[in-house]
Amino acid sequence: MGLDHAATKPHEALSALLQNELQAVNALITERMASKHAPRIPEVTAHLVGAGGKRLRPMLTLAAAKLCGYDGPYHLHLAATVEFIHTATLLHDDVVDESAQRRGRPTANLLWDNKSSVLVGDYLFSRSFQLMVETGSLRVLDILANASATIAEGEVLQLTAAQDLRTDESIYLQVVRGKTAALFSAATEVGGVIAGADETLVKALFDYGDALGISFQIVDDLLDYQGDSKATGKNVGDDFRERKLTLPVIKAVAKANADERAFWQRTIEKGKQVDGDLEHALTLLNTHGTLAETRQDALAWAEKAKTALAPLPEHEIKSLLIDLADYVVARVS
């Protein structure tokens, strides 16, 4: 999901501030996604890495390390690691979701095939572990290995939870913590760890990443029902068509009468969708005010993210991270 189309863009200010480091990370990514024996690997990876993603997660690692006064080389390795893990999960996600579009372009599985997407994703995961090891920090390895496991666990949980009307907000949060927030919080936490920061600061960075990631995913789920497909690079209603129980629908199911529940059972649980169902779903979401409620939840998580940064020193980067939390939610009106 892009972070475009708002008045101020803190991720761009952050990108400008970290320009030299980001260039070095990009060079490292290009160097490490090369393969002597399998030219398809850089082809597939370059398609996704070069598709104009915002590099948000690696930027968070660089920002956290800099905020904690780090001046060594290994934050670059960690930023590249985080981007490789993210890219690997995207390649796998698009196969699982049978998606045709990502960042406004055809997905790798559509251009090549599912086999290539899965295997190149595996290669990038392996590459990410090689990069982590080079930092020499067992703790960093522990954090990122745990995050990788949590991401996979979140995706598997989503498989069973996404089409089950018994899925409530606590299970939804568990899925989101897994598939999205785990990498945000690992990205910020390892920045503090590699800088040798005080435990209070490391915890603050973890909490910021966790809350930012949750807010980010809630907004994404909201944009699926009320976004502009030109801005998001996805079609409105994709989650509905893919029968994904996201927060606006979970809230609507909780308030549903018998007829409405039967509608959700038919469209989400059984997957029997007909013309006009998306429009009816949107009517129900608006009737029960669940889109507005979901936005309030996203705002609350953004506030948690901002509050978490309190122990960190005053710094231009800290101000931009606070702005970033506001901006993530500003994507939905």
Image: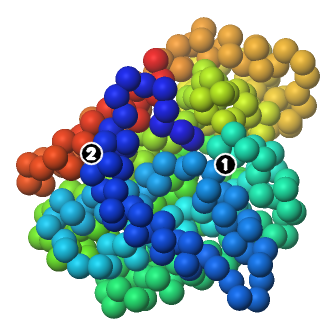
Q: CA distance from mark 2 to mark 1?
A: 32 Å
Q: Which mark is residue 87?
A: none
Which quadrant of the figure contains the N terminus? top right
Q: Is residue 155 above or below residue 318?
A: below
Residue 138 in view here: no
Return the x and y of residue 237 as percentages of the image width and height.
Answer: 72, 28
30 or 308, which lies in front? 30
Q: Identify the residue shown where x is 76% and y is 14%.
A: 279
Q: Identify the residue shown where x is 51% and y is 86%.
A: 130
Residue 271 lies in quadrant: top right
Residue of label 2: 321
How many neighbours does mark 1 have within 10 angstroms: few (below 14), some (14-19), or many (20 or more)? some
Taking the image as shown, residue 146 lies to the left or right of residue 275, namely left
171 or 23, which lies in front? 23
Q: Earlier in the sequence, mark 2 or mark 1?
A: 1
Q: Is residue 85 above or below residue 51?
A: below
Residue 63 lies in quadrant: bottom left
Residue of label 1: 161
Taking the image as shown, residue 219 lies to the left or right of residue 48, namely left
Q: Amino acid at mark 2?
A: Leu
Return the x and y of residue 211 as percentages of the image width and height.
Answer: 35, 46
